[in-house]
Image (cartoon, helix red, strand yellow):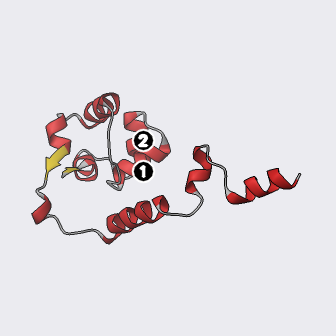
Amino acid sequence: MIEIRIKEIAKERGIQNAHRLQLAAELSPAVASRFWKSKIEKISMETLGRLCKALECQPGDLLVFVPAETRPASKEREGVARQKTSTASRPGRNDKMGKESPKTIKRTRVR
């Protein structure tokens, strides 16, 4: 897994919070907050470039590879995985994909 070290690098450069990161890298408040908390799953090349420019560093300074077996399991990430799994098996999910539910069919026949 690849982890991002924005907070550590930023503090070394004198940026003490997500708001200052937002201003320095010209990011939206939500994006700056997610980076500050290391709660991101992907990053665009443009954003990576902005961060490197603001923090005066190279991409390799921000990104670190951590093998899965050495990384402790996060309860929060496990919760997200469970939530995604349970959402997929929720009844009525196929209704949005063009299939009619039994209630819709029944109403159509009665009228």
Mark 1: which amino acid? Ser
Helix, strand or loop status at disc 1: helix
What is the total number of numbered labels drawn onto the structure image? 2
Residue at the front extreme, as displayed: 109
Residue at the spot of label 2: 22
Q: Closer to the camera, 62 or 11?
A: 62
Q: Which residue is mark 1?
A: 33
105 sits to left or right of 27: right
Residue 6 lies left or right of residue 76; in this view the side is left
Q: Position of residue 85 (x, y in %)?
A: 41, 62
User: How far apart are the two marked residues, 1 and 2, measured between alpha carbons?
Assistant: 8 Å
- Does 3 appear above or below 81? above
**Residue 52: where, in percent of width, then height?**
25, 33
**Dot 2: few (<14), some (14–19), or many (≥20) neighbours within 10 Å?**
many
**Which of the two labelled residues, at mark 1 and mark 2, occupies the earlier sequence position?**
2
Within 10 Å of the Cα at label 1, are there few (<14), some (14-19), or many (20+) other Cα atoms? some
For residue 66, above or below residue 30? below
Please tell me which residue is depicted at 39% across the width and 67% down the height of the picture. Answer: 82
Picture residue at 31% right of the left edge, 54% below the top: 38
Q: Label for residue 55?
A: none
Give the mark toward the camera: 1 or 2: 1
x and y percent of residue 63 in the render? 18, 44
Amino acid at dot 2: Gln
Q: Secondary structure at mark 2?
A: helix
- Taking depth in this image into account, of 12 and 6 the one nearest to the observer is 6
Q: Which residue lies at the image location 49% right of the left edge and 44% below the top edge?
A: 29
Above-or-below relation of 39 to 77: above
Asked whether the residues under the numbered discs 1 and 2 touch, taking CB atoms below 8 Å apart as contact, a structural biologist would say yes
Image spot of residue 77 (x, y percent): 33, 64
| Residue sitting at the far bottom | 75
